[in-house]
Amino acid sequence: MIIYKDAFTGDELFSDSVPMKLINNIVYKLKGTMRTDVFDIDDSAIGGNKSAEVQDEGADAASKQGVDIVLNGRLVEYTLAKKDYLPHIKAYMKQVKERLEKELPDQVEVFTSNAQNFIKEVLADYKEYQLFSGESMHPDGMLALMKWEDDVPYMYFFKHGLIEEKVVSTHFLRLH
């Protein structure tokens, strides 16, 4: 499995377990799904013995509903007016370009030309997007974009602002 992390904050954003495609060699477009996680505490999980105790109504199960990519990556919705997004994205793009100049100079031209076109598309339809930051909510981090197409949430992450980390499973089958 590959975990994609924000290159500037180290926040884990998503993994390759989600259907995705690379658009114009600039952004990963991930197809999300709605999910509801239910958190129910069972007495046996905390050492309770229901038969030996007075019957108690207990607590209702808690639940959290959202897009799987957001829940899995512990992403945080980030509200930013269009007039405030523009300076943020310009600063972020400058930061990515500087990183590329040092680490991947052959990618600078691809990034600058394609990123500008993508950002123009986002700004033209800005009200249709939601923004999400990584768990740390660090201001230098990537703001992922989510846009609903029909009833399907799609998230966009800038390829050049990510670090790929291959994770090897540590689960081994023990045979006797």
Image: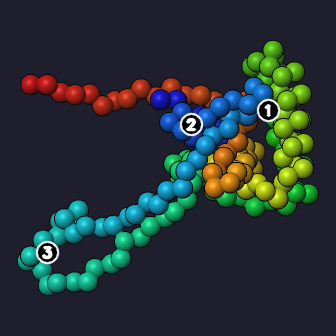
Check disc 2 and report its element: helix, strand or loop: loop
Where on the picture, by quarter, is residue 121?
Answer: top right
On the image, the x and y values in percent for residue 58 come to 28, 79
Which disc is residue 50 wearing? 3
Q: Which residue position holds label 1?
A: 96
Label 3 – label 1 distance at C-alpha: 57 Å
Nearer to the camera, 47 or 72: 72
Nearer to the camera, 21 or 157: 21
Check disc 1 and report its element: helix, strand or loop: helix
On the image, the x and y values in percent for residue 4 come to 59, 34
Residue 36's place in the image compared with 162, above or below, is: below
Q: Is residue 88 left or right of residue 44?
A: right
Residue 137's place in the image compared with 113, above or below, is: below
On the image, the x and y values in percent for residue 143 come to 73, 47
Check disc 3 and report its element: helix, strand or loop: helix
Label 2 – label 3 distance at C-alpha: 43 Å
Q: Residue at x 36, y 77 (%)?
A: 60
Label 2 – label 1 distance at C-alpha: 25 Å
Q: Check contact, mark 2 vs mark 1: CB within 8 A.
A: no
Which disc is residue 86 wearing? none
| Disc with the residue nearer the chain's start (2 vs 3) | 2
Query: Around disc 1, counting alpha carbons within 10 Å, would you say few (fewer than 14), some (14 to 19), or many (20 or more)?
Result: many
Question: In the rendered image, is residue 73 in sight?
Answer: yes
Query: Around disc 3, counting alpha carbons within 10 Å, would you say few (fewer than 14), some (14 to 19), or many (20 or more)?
Result: few
Quarter of the image with the C terminus in it:
top left
Residue type at the position of mark 2: Pro
Depth-wise, is mark 2 or mark 3 nearer the camera? 2
| Disc with the residue nearer the chain's start (2 vs 1) | 2
Q: Residue at x 84, y 38 (%)?
A: 118
Which disc is residue 19 wearing? 2
